[in-house]
């Protein structure tokens, strides 16, 4: 494929700063590789003076591979790596740190679990909650925001204390986490101009891929590194800026032209990936964003298949529909790896994953899909059901005897075997406690006669579990709505099963499948790809199923409440990214009811249907 006009202009750019706006499928990786080849082959730049910065190790390896294919051994001295990898190299040379000084993700979550356990937070038992807390700590560091000033959603009343306790435990281990690398490198360059000058002389030409994903500390360091020559070549697409939750800001794309007023600007406007219909429809959506660079994009391919929008009853019918379509495509000879099911949140992938598991259709989850049944709320519900079925353990008793609060002391279950009779004996002299214990036992007996869906509803409404969660949220300065949504999801998940044992059996199989996925995640797994819209960026597939296109799903209710119009525009960019992953076929689906309530199609569906 010959370079088009925009690509040639970017490749041949001379000295100084340059911003390249690269639409989806426009050949940005090839443009970066060709520019490096031009700098070395035509401009006489030494390969060791060139630095390519990416956001993923996969992208860095792809760059190195393509450079080697084009330049042979001449490409070896070119440095290509992630922000973290580059900054680690700088810190390693300055401070002599090694891998033993880097806090692993496992260690990070262990520390956070300890901190939350010390504070008696149920979140210590919830992987999703731990992940969100870790993400907020990272955003505070990357945004260079003091913990007292950071607005936390997961721990609004105690974030600063959790942050400090985490930092104290981390420092006691004499380790730094990935976010510390960026902060430390920034501090090093600000305090040691002599060291900064050494690296400025080494890297005279800097190329940054996916520039729209840059955050404050990354931008600050890369600007310092590019001085004094400012040979800074940045490639990105403001329409694909989707990492605001990590502190990334598309504002830096606009600020770049202010910080470098003489910078050249080039647009890569041809989409070589997707059909004409996919490109046209994606532009109908993204065109509603006000804060963006205006650019014309056109498809190189023919119109292709029409976009298909599918309405379904609920998430179970949606999962069945997607699985049916996948089975048809597999029968028609399309490889499973050429299909992707995309969703807004990790938890939104559960219904499809469970349906594919039941049908024995191979699938591969690129990132860790949180197990709904690992959430403390789901664990509470399952403990109730085990008690009702007569298979409950002492641990199940301890778990739910005060959810809702019944003021039952742990000492009342001092023996190996837990029973209501043992608790009664302990409280034999307290009539008011005996009434509570009788009600607890009555509730458990009622559950034994119910199917799982009815049982979960009874636990929530009749046994008082929803009231317990509301009180827990109020006492800990948390929002009740996310907890209620988890309850709704557990209730919805229970619907298809006639008995608790059927549900338990399915949960065991599904959980085993997730563990298997986790074990082989590092390898290129086989099967249909399941991933969040965030994880899909940079990838492409023949067929894409974009599921859960409902108001409150995408755009996500949380993003709208947190950031208003700014949040809406990022959600629209995320939808746009999902659409443009498809090369030949795109299916968008939405549900009419979710968790027993009527829901509306996403406003983005409405934008797609506009003439």
Image (cartoon, grey):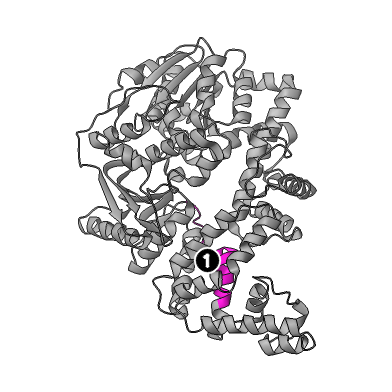
Residue 585 percent coordinates (x, y): 26, 45
Q: Magenta includes 179?
A: no
* Horizontal arrangement in the rendering, residue 89 relative to residue 487 (left or right): right
347 w.r.t. 149: above or below: below
* Horizontal arrangement in the rendering, residue 478 relative to residue 173 (left or right): left
Q: Quadrant of the C terminus?
A: top left
* Horizontal arrangement in the rendering, residue 329 relative to residue 223 (left or right): left
Q: Nearer the viewer, residue 379 or 523?
A: 379
Residue 73 percent coordinates (x, y): 46, 29
Q: Nearer the viewer, residue 532 or 383?
A: 383
Q: Quadrant of the N terminus?
A: top left
378 w.r.t. 150: above or below: below
Residue 253 percent coordinates (x, y): 50, 24
Query: Within 10 Å of the Cα at label 1, are there few (<14), some (14-19), or many (20+) other Cα atoms?
Result: some
Element type where label 1 sits in the image: helix
Residue at horizontal 67 percent and vertical 37 percent from the top = 141
Q: Which residues are magenta?
A: 367-384
Q: Is residue 521 visible?
A: no
Residue 598 occupies quadrant: bottom left
Which residue is labeled 1 in the image? 373
Residue at horizontal 56 percent and vertical 40 percent from the top = 562
* Horizontal arrangement in the rendering, residue 365 relative to residue 101 (left or right): left
Q: Nearer the viewer, residue 564 or 240?
A: 564
Residue 252 percent coordinates (x, y): 54, 25
Residue at horizontal 29 percent and vertical 53 percent from the top = 311
């Amino acid at each position: 494929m010959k370079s088009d006009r925009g690509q040639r202009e970017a490749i041949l750019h001379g000295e100084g700063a340059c911003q390249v706006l690269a639409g989806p499928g426009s050949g940005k990786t090839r443009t970066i590789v060709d520019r490096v080849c031009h700098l070395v082959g035509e401009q006489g730049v030494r390969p060791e003076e060139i630095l390519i910065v990416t956001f993923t190790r996969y992208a860095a390896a792809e760059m190195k591979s393509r450079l080697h294919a084009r330049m042979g051994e001449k490409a070896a001295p070119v440095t290509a790596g992630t922000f973290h990898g580059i900054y680690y190299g700088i810190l390693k040379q300055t401070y002599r740190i090694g891998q033993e000084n880097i806090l692993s993700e496992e260690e990070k979550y262990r520390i956070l679990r300890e901190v939350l356990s010390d504070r008696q937070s149920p979140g210590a038992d919830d992987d999703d909650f731990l992940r969100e807390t870790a993400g907020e700590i990272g955003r505070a560091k990357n945004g260079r925001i003091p913990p007292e000033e950071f607005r936390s959603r997961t721990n609004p009343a105690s974030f600063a204390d959790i942050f400090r306790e985490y930092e104290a435990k981390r420092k006691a281990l004499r380790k730094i986490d990935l976010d510390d690398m960026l902060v430390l490198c920034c501090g090093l360059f600000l305090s040691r101009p002599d060291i900064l000058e050494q690296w400025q002389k080494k890297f005279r030409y800097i190329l940054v891929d996916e520039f729209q994903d840059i955050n404050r500390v990354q931008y600050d360091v890369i600007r310092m590194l590019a001085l004094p020559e400012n040979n800074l070549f940045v490639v990105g697409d403001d329409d694909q800026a989707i990492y605001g939750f990590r502190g990334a800001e598309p504002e830096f794309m606009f600020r770049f032209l202010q910080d470098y007023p003489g910078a050249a600007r080039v647009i890569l406007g041809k989409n070589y990936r997707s059909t004409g219909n996919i490109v046209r429809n994606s532009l109908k959506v993204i065109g509603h964003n006000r804060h963006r660079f205006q650019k014309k994009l056109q498809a190189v391919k023919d119109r292709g298949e029409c976009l298909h929008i599918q309405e379904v009853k609920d998430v179970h019918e949606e999962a069945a529909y997607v699985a049916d379509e996948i089975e048809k495509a597999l029968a028609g000879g399309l490889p499973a790896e050429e299909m992707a099911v995309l969703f807004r949140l990790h938890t939104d992938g559960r219904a499809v994953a469970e349906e594919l598991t039941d049908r024995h259709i191979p699938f591969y989850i690129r990132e860790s899909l949180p197990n709904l049944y690992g959430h403390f709320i789901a664990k509470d519900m399952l403990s109730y059901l085990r008690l009702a079925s007569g298979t409950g353990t002492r641990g199940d008793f301890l778990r739910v005897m005060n959810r809702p609060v019944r003021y039952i002391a742990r000492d009342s279950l001092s023996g190996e075997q837990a029973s209501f009779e043992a608790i009664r004996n302990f409280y034999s002299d307290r009539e008011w406690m005996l009434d509570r214990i009788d009600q607890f036992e009555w509730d458990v007996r009622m559950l034994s006669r119910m199917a799982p869906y009815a049982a979960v509803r009874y636990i929530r409404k009749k046994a008082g579990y929803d009231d317990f969660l509301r009180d827990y949220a109020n006492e800990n300065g948390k929002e009740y709505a996310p907890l209620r949504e988890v309850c709704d999801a557990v209730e919805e998940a229970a619907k298809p099963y006639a008995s608790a044992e059927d549900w338990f059996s399915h949960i065991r199989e599904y959980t085993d499948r997730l563990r298997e996925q986790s074990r082989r995640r590092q390898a290129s797994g086989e099967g249909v790809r399941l991933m969040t819209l965030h994880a899909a960026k940079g990838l492409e597939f023949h067929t894409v199923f974009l599921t859960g296109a409902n108001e409150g799903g995408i755009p996500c209710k949380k993003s709208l409440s947190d950031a208003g119009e700014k949040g809406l525009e990022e959600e629209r960019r995320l939808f746009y990214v999902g659409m443009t992953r498809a090369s030949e076929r795109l299916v968008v689906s939405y549900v009419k009811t979710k968790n027993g309530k009527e829901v509306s199609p996403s406003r983005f569906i409405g934008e797609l249907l506009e003439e």
